[in-house]
Image (cartoon, rainbow, N blue to C red):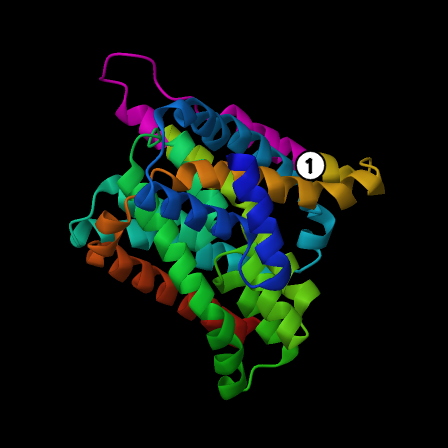
């Protein structure tokens, strides 16, 4: 079932490239779960793809990041990315608490908006012990799809109204938009594809330290509780970081680096289809506060990165 959904998502993506296979797979899983339900015999396989296959996909994501290219962006761009991401991640959780949302929902929305969309939501969900919190995951994924898709026409329009140069628009797009595919769509339409995607991959690198710090903090919170504590750094996150470093050595053959993005897209789509089957659209529709938090978080990262672009680029 996951393979069929992945194949359909890849086909639709060929004709509608602004929608990534991962986002399409999440939507397909949610539609299936809410229209026909998920048969019990499918659950073991869907659990496998949404956890084990997901970890492999995130680990392989590291091979897409050419660290020398990211470092070549210069300290100004890296500072914009780091400050905008960090500020959004921390502030979103504080605002979520003030809005009365659960810590898990606030954490996943903060992660998805500040780092790299659906993949970051899925990674944090696994690492932070929220694998059974379907409502939090649904809210975060819904926010990523809604506001990330809205950014595709709005970011170029706002960039034009604000008089941003091509270099400024490339940095702002990569530093502010949620999904890699959404960044690529804006970059391709605006002529800043390479710069925007490279900046975005700089944000993806931050997935490892942010997940590790969150796991460490939650590990401390479990000290007084019975049972095993979560690891400081989940294995798949450590492998992701190792893959980033390996790619940076230049030892990975070109044929492999060229093939990895397609493989990662397939695995991520399968994993997120499994995750999507746990989404209850009726609860998501009632989640006004989650949507509000997502909008606020999107505004924070967009405004912070825009200010950085205006000052430093």
Vertical side of 10 occupied by 195: above or below: below
Vertical side of 64 occupied by 177: above or below: below
Residue 217, x across and y down, in percent: 34, 31
Q: From the viewer's side, name the closer residue of 225 and 157.
A: 157
Residue 117, x across and y down, in percent: 46, 51
Residue drawn at x 27%, y 19% as measured from the top left: 223
Residue drawn at x 19%, y 54% as measured from the top left: 286
Q: Is residue 230 magenta?
A: yes
The 10 Å Cα crowd at callout 1, few under 14, some 14 to 19, many 20 or more, is some
Does the image show residue 76?
no
Residue 128, x across and y down, in percent: 36, 32
Residue 284, x across and y down, in percent: 26, 51
Q: Is residue 220 left or right of residue 306?
A: left
Residue position for label 1: 245
Vertical side of 246 occupied by 227: above or below: above
Does the image show residue 148?
yes
Range drawn in magenta: 217-244
Q: Quadrant of residue 221?
A: top left
Q: From the viewer's side, name the closer residue of 304 and 311.
A: 304
Vertical side of 128 occupied by 79: above or below: below
């Amino acid at each position: 079932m996951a393979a069929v959904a992945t194949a359909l998502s890849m086909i639709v993506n060929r004709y509608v490239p602004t929608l990534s296979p991962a986002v399409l797979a999440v939507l397909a899983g949610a539609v299936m779960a809410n229209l026909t339900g998920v048969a019990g015999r499918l659950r073991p396989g869907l659990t496998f793809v949404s956890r084990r296959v997901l970890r492999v996909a995130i680990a392989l994501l590291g091979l897409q990041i050419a660290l020398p290219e990211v470092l070549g962006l210069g300290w100004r761009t890296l500072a914009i990315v780091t400050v905008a991401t960090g500020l959004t991640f921390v502030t979103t959780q504080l605002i979520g608490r003030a809005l009365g949302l659960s810590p898990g929902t606030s954490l996943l929305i903060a992660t998805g908006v500040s780092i790299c969309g659906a993949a970051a939501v899925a990674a944090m969900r696994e690492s932070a012990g929220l694998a059974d919190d379907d409502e939090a995951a649904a809210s975060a994924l819904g926010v990523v799809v809604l506001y990330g898709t809205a950014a595709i026409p709005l970011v170029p329009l706002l960039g034009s109204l604000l008089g941003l140069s091509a270099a400024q628009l490339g940095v702002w797009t990569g530093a502010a938009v949620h999904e890699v595919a959404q960044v690529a769509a804006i970059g391709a339409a605006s002529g800043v594809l390479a710069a925007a995607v490279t900046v975005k991959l700089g944000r993806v690198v931050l997935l490892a330290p942010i997940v590790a710090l969150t796991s460490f903090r939650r590990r401390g919170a479990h000290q007084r509780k019975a049972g095993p504590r979560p690891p400081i750094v989940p294995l798949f996150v450590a492998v992701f970081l190792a893959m980033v470093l390996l790619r940076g050595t230049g030892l990975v053959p070109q044929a492999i680096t060229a093939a990895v993005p397609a493989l990662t897209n397939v695995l991520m789509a399968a994993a997120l289809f499994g995750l999507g089957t746990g989404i209850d659209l009726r609860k998501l529709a009632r989640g006004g506060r989650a949507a509000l938090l997502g909008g606020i978080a999107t505004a924070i990262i967009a405004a912070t990165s825009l200010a950085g672009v205006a000052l430093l680029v």
